[in-house]
Structure formats: structure tokens, C-alpha cells
Amino acid sequence: MTGYLPQPDRDSAPWWERLAERRFAVQECCSCGALRFPPRAFCAACRTEEWRWREVAPEGTVESWIVSRQPFVPGRRDPYLVVMVRLAAVPGCLVYGNWRAPRPPVPWEPVTGEYVEVAAGVTLLNWAPAGDGSEPGTGAAAGTAP
């Protein structure tokens, strides 16, 4: 992949490391048990700074999507679709990723995450319909990087 690669920071670096190992995790507050994503230094619910990683299934439902026609990646001109997914394990959390199906998403459609290595040590999570791909809400598509 040419172009921009994620730049992990203090809070997100452990998340990106787990993603590279094909493990999807959210933060869990050690004090109140609140689950959160994206990674943050403290809990928004109780303000404590103690937390741990909790692995959850990369599953959810399509909340919204956009079609990007702006060529943000050098050399890439075709439009691509980005979905906003509400995590099943953490309903208050929204995750963005590329859509990987031969058709558009459907509102509230169940989806599963697909790990795609785009560079050495850099993995992204794309989203595809849950199931075999023949009908809305029943498909899994091969993950390829944008």
C-alpha cells in the first residue's frame, strides 16, 4: 500500500499491535468495567486511569457509510466505500473501515471484521457482510486494502 499509514500514539499503539496479531480488543475500565473504543488514557464514565484490554469479536452492524471519491491514496482514483460499524460487544462504540462486498451495505446489516495486512506490521480491519455474500446480511468478501 502506498500512501498514508496509521501513526499509532501513546494510547492507540497497543491496539494497533493487537490488530497486527489479528486480535480485536477494546479497553475495559478496571474500576467501573465500562468498555470503550477508541483507546483513551482515562475512563469517560468514572475518570479512572486504570484499564486493561479486552478481546471482543470484530462483529457489529452497519450504522452508516460514505463513498469517497477523493483520491487520498496516491495512484488510486476509483471510489471506495467506508462504513461506520456499531460494535455488537460494545454498542456505544463505533468503528470505521473499508467495505468489502460486491454490493452496497444495508442499514443495520450484520457485519464481521476482516484483517488485511497493508504493510509490514500494519494491519487494517475491513468490514464485510456476515454470512456467504449472496444476499444483504449474508456475505463475506475477500479483504483487500484500499
Image (cartoon, helix red, strand yellow):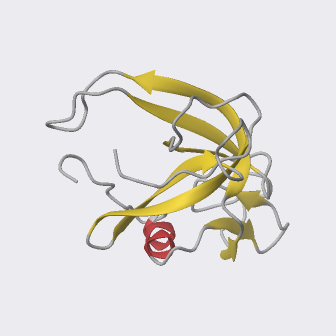
Residue 119 against residue 78 in the figure, above or below: below
Determine if residue 39 is in view: no
Seen in the picture, residue 34 relative to 21 is either above or below; the reply is above
Q: Residue at x 74, y 41 (%)?
A: 137
- Residue beneath the point at 26% across and 72% down: 120
Q: Residue 136 or 92: which is nearer the viewer?
A: 136
In which quadrant will I find the N terminus?
Answer: bottom left
- The spot of residue 43 in percent (x, y) is 70, 59
Pinpoint residue 122: horizontal percent, then vertical percent: 34, 66
Task: Tell me residue 65's x, y (percent).
Answer: 57, 28
**101 or 49: which is nearer to us?**
101
Q: Residue at x 64, y 28 (%)?
A: 64
Please state if 100 lies on the left or on the right of 116 as rendered: right
Residue 110: quadrant of the picture: top right
Q: Indicate the quadrant containing the C terminus: top left, top right, bottom left or bottom right.
A: top left
Task: Work out whether 87 lies above or below 31.
Answer: above
Seen in the picture, residue 71 relative to 38 is either above or below; the reply is: above
Residue at image point 64% right, 61% down: 42
Q: From where the camera sits, is residue 4 visible?
A: yes
